[in-house]
Image (spheres, rainbow, N blue to C red):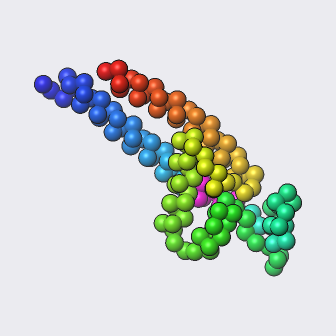
Amino acid sequence: ETLNGNSSVTGIFRLIKFVGMMVLVAHISGCVWMLLIELFECHVHAAALEDANTIVCGCEGPDCVAWNWMVKYDANLFENDNVSSKYLASLYFTIVTLSTVGFGDVTPANDTERVYAIFLALAGALVFAFCIGSISSLASQ
């Protein structure tokens, strides 16, 4: 039989294509999540970190510190120059969010990051629905 006529081979190719698209979406989303730190710098008064309700971006001066999802997750990682570890933390967040697992260990720290996290959560719901539909379609063949 030809490859086009074999439904199991076609199903495998569709599954590989689907997994590849998921990896690409997770990669791009992870890169954007990491890029938010650079594009939308948020500095707060160091004393404000003691009370999470008083954190407001916009501090300027010597007593200001960076405040973003990575600092909140692991301040040593933020200070570190290891790009691969930062990328893995970012990719981890996007995969956990897109897969609708949401462990809650990596969380947004400012409004810009919250807006992006909302977008990812909504995209995750759509991706989850698409996954179920695709898997059902493959299983029925």
- In the depicted structure, whether residue 32 falls above or below residue 65: above
The image position of residue 130, as x and y in percent, is 49, 30
Q: Residue at x 49, y 44 (%)?
A: 25
- In the depicted structure, whether residue 4 falls above or below residue 71: above
State the extent of the magenta-drawn residues as a range: 33-40
Task: Quadrant for the C terminus, please.
Answer: top left
Task: Quadrant for the N terminus, please.
Answer: top left
In the image, farthest residue toward the front = 103
The answer to which of 120 and 32 lies nearer the viewer is 120
Direction from residue 101 to residue 8 in the image, left or right: left
- Can residue 66 be seen at all in this image of the molecule? yes
The image position of residue 53, as x and y in percent, is 85, 57
Give yes or no for residue 34 being in the magenta stretch: yes
- Can residue 56 be seen at all in this image of the molecule? no
In the image, farthest residue toward the left = 1
The image position of residue 115, as x and y in percent, is 70, 46
Q: Residue at x 63, y 56 (%)?
A: 106
The image position of residue 35, as x and y in percent, is 60, 58
Q: Residue at x 52, y 48 (%)?
A: 95
Direction from residue 41 to residue 97 in the image, left or right: left
